[in-house]
Amino acid sequence: MKVTDETCDEELLELSLEWNLSPEVAQTPFLSSLFDYVLANPDRDPGRKEDQSVETQAGACVKKVVSQLQNAGLASEAATLMARYQRVHPALRTLDTALGALSRWLRR
């Protein structure tokens, strides 16, 4: 299945975040679209409506998705998202580097 604007939109991605379905989405072709959406909205708190004026923690959406992926045993996917969020150069995004960064980040 090829992911296009017709098969995937922001509402679908937002709902998958609200319902904590990131690990399930990670096993589909929509993972790249989910990562792109999360990285475009890193501070958004999934489940919180935009009109609510409560400040969210920096990277709240990214941290929530990384945590969900890590808890589901998808460490490489979680590490990949963290590497992209931290803007690690693509040449340095090896699995070992990404897992090391994830490990350091989770210890904070």
Image: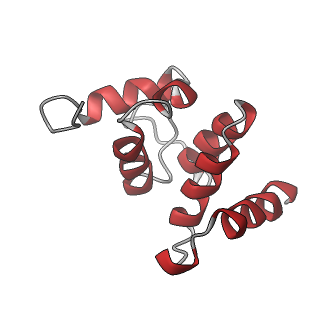
Visible residue check, residue 47: no
The quarter of the image holding the N terminus is top left
Which residue lies at the image location 82% right of the left edge and 64% below the top edge?
Answer: 104
**Depicted 37 relative to depicted 29: above or below:** below
Which residue lies at the image location 57% right of the left edge and 57% below the top edge?
Answer: 80
**Residue projecting furthest to the right:** 107
**Depicted 93 relative to depicted 77: above or below:** below
Rendering colour mode = secondary structure
Work out whether residue 3 or residue 44 is closer to the camera in this orientation and state it. Answer: 3
**Depicted 62 relative to depicted 69: above or below:** below
Place of residue 33 in the rendered image (x, y in percent of width and height, measured from the top left): 34, 44
Place of residue 99 in the rendered image (x, y in percent of width and height, measured from the top left): 73, 60
Visible residue check, residue 101: yes
Apparent side of residue 107 relative to residue 12 in the rendered image (left or right): right
Which residue lies at the image location 77% right of the left edge and 61% below the top edge?
Answer: 105
Work out whether residue 59 or residue 33 is closer to the camera in this orientation and state it. Answer: 33
Place of residue 52 in the rendered image (x, y in percent of width and height, measured from the top left): 45, 35
The quarter of the image holding the C terminus is bottom right
